[in-house]
Every structure is written in C-alpha cells, then in structure tokens.
Image (cartoon, helix red, strand yellow):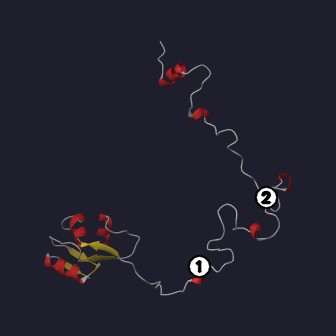
Amino acid sequence: MARKTKTATAAADAPEGVEHLGLHNLMPAPGSHRNRKRIGRGPGSGTGKTSGKGHKGIKARAGHHGPGGGKPQFEGGQMPLSRRLPKRGFTNIFRVEHQVIRLSDLERRLPEGTAVTRESLVQAGLISARKGPAKVLANGDLSRAVTVRGIRMSAGAREKIEAAGGRVEE
C-alpha cells in the first residue's frame, strides 16, 4: 500500500484545476518583467554606435547621468561644497593610532601567569594583529602580578601594575 506524502495529500485536497504555488511553478506577473536593453551591439540592434545616447553633450559621456547617478560632488556647474568651504587644520599622515587596552581587560581575559606581550594580547582577542601598536591604560584595577614586555603604557597603568607586584620590561 503506497503511503501519501503531505504534498500528495495537499494536491488531492485542492479543487479541480487549481495548482498549488511551489518553487517549480514560480513566474513573474505578466508584463512585469522585461529583458534588459543590450546596447552597443551593432547597427541592426537599433542601439548600436552611440548606444542610444545621441551625439556629444554631457549626457553622452561616460560616468554621468543614467543608472548609478552622476559624478560624485558634481553640482550642475555650481561651485561644489567641498570647494566653497574654508579649509582648516592639518592631517598628519605619520600619526600612529594605538589600540587601547584597559587594566580590567588584562585582569579578565589573560590567564594567570601569562606575560603580557603583543602576541598574547592578539591570542586573547584584546587587539588586532593587523592594526597599530597596543597601549595599556589605567582603567580598572589589577589584583594579580603581571609582567608586561614591549608594550607602551600610561604612567598610571605603570604605577598600578607595579603596586600589584608586577613588573614592566621595555
């Protein structure tokens, strides 16, 4: 005796001539889907040569108008905002951005007896290996002695580490 599946049961319960919606019979609504316009495919296509853009002018140029918008910061010939505003300040291209580590993070994430090095901080997930150097700040407290090697720190962090019985090696 053949066993009925859910789909077979549902098909049997459906009225005559009505097919249930499924992945096998999905289609867009009639008239809602149109093939894309293939431009620049020869004179027989009707959109060859200038690709339906006419001759010359800004609308015929690449990278302007049409899908995807215009040129970034182009304001129709008006002086762009980036040029109208006064320029102030200075950006130092040699600036080094440190990754900040709190003393409370060292307390919580590093196992007992581990020396605090760049490698141990990366392994503990406290810093990223691909970003700049690490710096320990005095946020939080440290209850156990740790040895810090080759990592910059604030004066307050140095005091707290030494007060907890740890040491700092440059």
**Farthest-out residue, right:** 44
Q: Which of the 4 quarters of the picture holds residue 115?
A: bottom left
Secondary structure at numbered mark 2: loop
Q: Residue at x 66, y 68 (%)?
A: 70
Query: What residue is disc 1 on?
Result: 81
Front residue of 39/142: it is: 39
Q: Amino acid at mark 1?
A: Leu
Q: Residue at x 22, y 65 (%)?
A: 108
Residue 152 on image: x %, y %:
29, 80
Whole-Å distance between the Cαs marked 1 and 2?
Answer: 36 Å
Few, some or many residues within 10 Å of mark 1 (<14, 14–19, 20+): few
Residue 100 on image: x %, y %:
32, 74
Q: Which of the 4 quarters of the picture holds residue 20?
A: top right
Query: What residue is disc 2 on?
Result: 40
Residue 60 appears in the figure:
yes
Secondary structure at numbered mark 1: helix
Contact, mark 1 vs mark 2 (Cβ under 8 Å) = no
Q: Which of the 4 quarters of the picture holds residue 155?
A: bottom left
Q: Residue at x 40, y 81 (%)?
A: 96
